Amino acid sequence: MTEYEQPATAWSPRMSDAAANAEARRIIDDVYRPARPVPPVPTSFRDETPAPAIGDAVPVHQDDRRIVPAWAAGAAVASIGIGAGTTGVGCGVWLVLKGFASMSVTGVVCMGVLFSGAAFFVLSIGAAFSRAKRSVSKHVYTGPVTKNTHVTTHSRGLSRTNNTFHG
């Protein structure tokens, strides 16, 4: 007999059959019991303060939070344009070289694909630069703006003119 084998008399059940069945039923019921419902997480906020009966409501400060800055969006558009453009140019070169082997309608279409890929590349770069150049600025003026410009002109002869601006 090896060290792992035990004589048949050394093992005896520690629970009765009724206790084992009750324990098995409890374990199975615990496993298949429906989970408790998860309480809902609020995803928005509702301001419950009453609005005034007459007049406007009190202004509330709202932060200006942009998800993506303008320069990052421009860089993303430029990188997408460059990637698509180089892919188009590479496909165009492959199609042109294949098209030169058999000059037919397919060859003419291949030439068109090459030029359309180059045009797409140029358009995407131009669009990226035009959007990146635009600045987002917000001017808030707190008072009235009055602009009074008076110009006094003195002319002597045909070529001697003196303009004086009064602000």
Image (cartoon, helix red, strand yellow):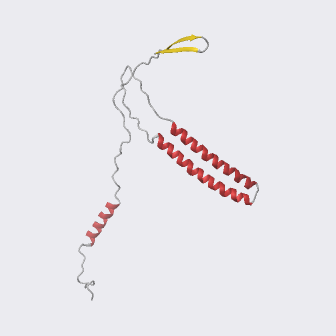
Extreme residue in the right direction: 104
- The number of numbered discs placed on residues in the rendered structure image is 0
9 or 76, which is in the foreground? 76
Tell me: 136 left or right of 7: right
Q: Give the side of residue 63 with respect to residue 121, left or right.
A: left
Q: Where is residue 140? Give x, y as percent.
A: 42, 26
Residue 63 lies in quadrant: top left
Q: Position of residue 55 (x, y in %)?
A: 38, 20
Q: Is residue 125 above or below residue 107?
A: above
Q: Residue at x 54, y 42 (%)?
A: 128
Residue at (27, 72) in percent of width and height: 17
Which residue does the image show at 51% across and 37% down from the upper left?
133
Q: For the C terminus, which image quadrant?
A: top left
In the image shown, does 54 or 29 lie closer to the viewer?
54
Image quadrant where one finds the N terminus: bottom left
| Residue 85 pos. (x, y %) | 59, 50
In the rendered image, residue 20, in percent from the top left (x then y), is placed at 27, 70
* 1 vs 124: above or below: below
Position of residue 37 in the picture relative to residue 124 (left or right): left
Q: Residue at x 50, y 45 (%)?
A: 75
Horizontal arrangement in the rendering, residue 69 relative to residue 124 (left or right): left
